[in-house]
Amino acid sequence: MSSVGGKMTCVMKKGSSEARKIAAFRRRQRCQMQAFCTKCWSLISTQDVVCPLCGADPGNDTRSFEQKLVAALEHPFPSTRARICWLLGQHGGSWSIPHLVRMLDDVDMFVRMAAIRALGEVGDESVVPALQRASKDDSLLLRIVAAGALEQVSARVFSHGKTRSKQQHGS
Ligand SMILES: [Zn+2]
């Protein structure tokens, strides 16, 4: 403590070991990153060449990323369907809107909630009637989420102005 130079060295050493720890953590995270088999939608490791459950070879799947996502909306696990809705909200474009609207009728409440949130992210004025319907859901939570999504969509449509909305109608 009394030696400034010594303290400095100590701090730097500590810092570099922290940096090593962070780098190791990041490497571990990459190793543990998981993927989905695009045939049976089981969780698989990114290192798996073929799916250990159904034997499908992901390299042989020629469908586009978008097609795979849309197919995954039929997954038997609601948690997976909800996750795909979230992904569509984050990365999907206007092409994902009809698929998300369809998910508003999902039997699982959390899938419906994920679809509503995603529509709040990517929806245009065409989703307003569907979100208005969702805002009358039996679940209070869903009604609140739907109201938020409606506000989000309205704010976006309004800020984009009338020139953009013409374009959105065309697609
Ligand atoms: Zn599989």
Image (cartoon, rainbow, N blue to C red):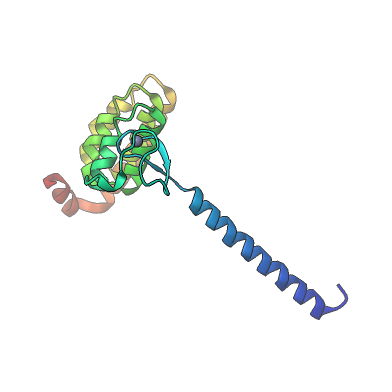
Residue 123, percent from left and from top:
27, 42
Spot occupied by residue 139 in the image (x, y as percentages of width and height) = 41, 21
Of residues 23 and 143, the one drawn nearer to the viewer in this rendering: 23
Residue found at x 35% / y 26%: 76
- Which residue is pictured at 31% across the width and 27% down the height? 134
Q: Position of residue 146 (x, y in %)?
A: 36, 32
Residue 147 in view, yes or no = no
- Of the 4 image quadrants, the one containing the N terminus is bottom right
Q: Nearer the viewer, residue 132 or 67?
A: 67
| Residue at 57% from the left image edge and 62% from the top image edge | 23
Q: Residue furthest right?
A: 2
The residue most toward the bottom is 5
**Among all residues in the image, which is located at the extreme left?**
170
- Identify the residue at the far top of this view: 138
Depth check: give the residue in front, 53 or 102.
Answer: 53
Instruction: Locate residue 67 relative to residue 149 in the image: left or right.
Output: left
Ligand 1 sits in which quadrant? top left
Residue 140 vs 58, above or below: the answer is above
Residue at x-position 14% and y-position 51%: 167
Image check: 58 left or right of 109?
left
- Place residue 58 in its image quadrant: top left
The answer to whether residue 135 is left or right of residue 4 is left
* 89 shown above or below 145: below
In this rendering, would 9 be left or right of 167? Answer: right
